[in-house]
Amino acid sequence: MLERRHPLLVALLSAGILCLAAMPSRAQDAEEEEYKPQLPEVAIYKAMLDANKQTGWIQFRDYDDRQLIYFTALQTMHCRLSEIRYSINSDALDQRFPLAKCNPQLPFNLPGDETAEYVYISLPAKTAQTLTIQAVWDDGAGSEIVVYKPCDNVGDATCAQIKTIKKPSKMLQQPKPADSPVRSVQSPIPGKTFSEPKPSSATRPAVE
């Protein structure tokens, strides 16, 4: 009798029952949505860079008749860097230190690297009197240019002193949208817009 007298009411009630039946399924779908790790804000990395400036973005060490130069402090920031530019005994900034592939789950970790390729460079003893260095962020902005020199009489301890600090003389070329290492964890890098390093240096490994 209800269907004959109030067909619209029956239809509305039926629709309401169907909606209620579907709600638990939607809630369950939302609960099961996988969380994707997010990189910390670049401001955190910039604060880290500034905090490490006095003690050294790089460290010199005399060891076993070699001069080792460690890039450890900067490598911990690799997820927000596009380049580490440096030069030895000049201000040319014509060499590049390799950056590890970014893992958003471990944004500050040093890469596992048995060859030390991502940790230090090895030179003949007393080669580097100064090392000029600049960090380039994932948006193409360049940091201050800092010139470091080895500390005096520290033996085989790791140490660096600031010799001079310079401001970038001009704006760096802005990268293409896909050049950001933050985006590179999601898509392949088509090619850098920055100047090419010397053959002896390396670039960030391609994303698999």
Image (spheres, helix red, strand yellow):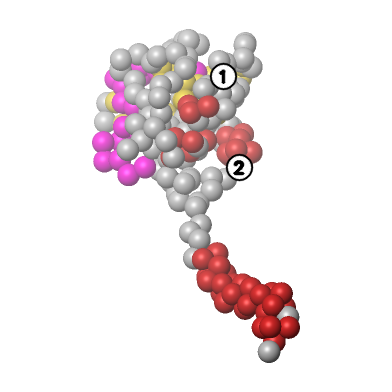
- Type of residue at label 1? Gln
| Residue 131 at least partly seen | no
- Location of residue 54 in the rendering, given as x and y in whole percent from the top left corner: 59, 32
Does 128 appear in magenta? yes
**Nearest to the observer: residue 88 or residue 151:** 88
Q: Which mark is residue 174?
A: 1
**Nearest to the observer: residue 7 or residue 73:** 7
Q: Residues within 10 Å of mark 1 (few under 14, many from 20)?
A: few
Relative vertical location of residue 56 with respect to residue 15 in this rendering, above or below: above
Q: Which residues are magenta?
A: 111-132
| Sequence-first disc among 2 and 1 | 2
**Nearest to the observer: residue 120 or residue 83:** 83
Residue drawn 47% across and 33% down?
Answer: 181
Quadrant into which the C terminus falls:
top left
Residue drawn 73% across and 80% down?
Answer: 6
- Type of residue at label 2? Glu
Q: Which mark is residue 41?
A: 2
Relative vertical location of residue 86 with respect to residue 74 in this rendering, above or below: above
